[in-house]
Amino acid sequence: MDKSTDTDLIESLHILGKRKGLILIVTLLCMLAAAIISSRMIPVYETSAKLLVAHRPAASSNQTTADPYQSVLLDERLAKTFSELLNGQVVANEVIKRLKLNTGSGDLLKRITAAPIIDTQLIQVTVKDTNPKRATDITNMLGIVLSERIKDIQSFSSSEPVTFIRLVEPATQPIYPVQPKPALYLVISMLAGLMFSSGLAFLLERLDTSVKVAPEIERLTGLSALGTIPVMTNRRAVGKQEANSVVLEAFRSLRTNIQYFNFDQSTKVILVSSAGPKEGKTTVSANLAIMLAKGGQKVMFIDCDFRKPQAHTVLNVKNEVGLSNILASKVDARGAVVSTQIEGLDMIPSGLIPPNPAEMLGSTRMKDFLMSLRTSYDFIIIDSPPILAVTDAAVVAPNVDGVLLVTRYGQTKKHALISAKAAFEKIGARMLGIVINHVMPGNGYDYNYIRYETHPSGAPARRAS
């Protein structure tokens, strides 16, 4: 089995595992429907009898010793003929008359099966009925009526009868119904439910155009997934009380990979953006800044989202004076810097919302301002608006060393992610990688045993392409 086949199998198992709830519910519903239907079905009983067809030569005939084989062949042909008589209305009407059945000949014939047994002189008659005794009576009466019918036909001949029917194995009254078969129906419904629900799972997966697992994202964008952030209960900064939490470990892993890019001190200014809103870019950028500061780096965190500034709420600082005031020359840069509770981490909030955000962020003053910060900080993390929503991130990107693109598990659409990457590359921005945010444990990721510790060699968890 080649590598591509292994990958396809793993992805198929992942899809089935992710949709296991749907598969279980659909399968149980199918089995429940089968159980209800079978419980409401009227039991049907089946019984059979065997009739012997014998041929006896007339007294006036001169049969030789070589004729027995021909006689057997004749009896087999007669068995076929008499089977057709058993399936005819004349015999059926006579049975109805004698047993005083409250049914028509057409309905009775639907429940009768008569056919010769191959290579024998026997006819097997099978009858199905909702009453086991009535099924037995009808089966045996068919043999009696057919025998008398043959005698009547042969009575028109001047010679003695040469053919007769004998009931050699009478029908016995059945104890158990042949229909319904609850156990069989449950097995069939379970298999049908599994097949249908599995097909539905793959269909829903195909219709779902959102990005999820890292291999899929890497194939779509050609970028490495630098971090996988589990679901966070709210927008918050990771703290010391979460020293052993999976969230903190995830951000440690992201920090390790970001530090890899800065091994030669060339990646200091990092823009964090996303394709669309509500994908967690602010939470990711703020916590990345925190983790870099906790790792001994001197970090500046800047809120460039003039449209909906939220970064200050994550770090619990005021947003009275900020970047917009600096760019409008209303305040000196030092007057807008806010010290946070995290040692080594400073922040510049967005400030007052200006009427022309894109123009201010794309100005020469913004470029010069970022350049001035490089000598004072090891890392400058910038939170910007979504690239596909407004042009703000696009005008800032040429002034940074790299762009980190945040996606949200099950929400960010594939086409949006591809468009976001293309938009940054169109302006010549350097793409560092992808962060997959808001991932539930079990959705292709396992946080129960993963440790995001930095390797002594300084190697990252995953190298970017």
Image (spheres, rainbow, N blue to C red):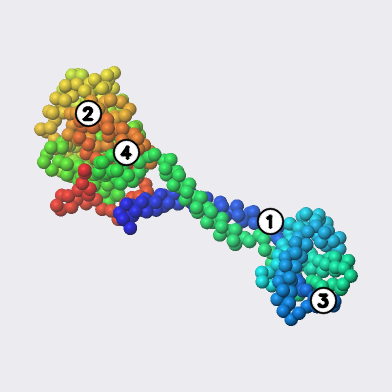
First reached walking from the N terminus: tag 3 or tag 1:
1
| Crowding at mark 2 (Cα within 10 Å: few <14, some 14-19, many 20+) | few
> Separation of disc 3 and disc 1 at Cα?
57 Å
Tell me the quarter of the picture where residue 380 sits. top left
Q: Which residue is mark 3?
A: 61
* Point 19% across, 48% down: residue: 460
First reached walking from the N terminus: tag 3 or tag 2:
3
Residue 193, above or below 227: below
Tell me the quarter of the picture where residue 312 sits. top left
Q: Nearer the viewer, residue 407 or 61?
A: 61
First reached walking from the N terminus: tag 2 or tag 4:
4
First reached walking from the N terminus: tag 4 or tag 1:
1
Q: Which residue is mark 2?
A: 427
Are the residues at dot 3 and dot 1 in contact (C-beta closer than 8 Å)?
Answer: no
Badge 2 amino acid: Ile
Badge 4 amino acid: Thr
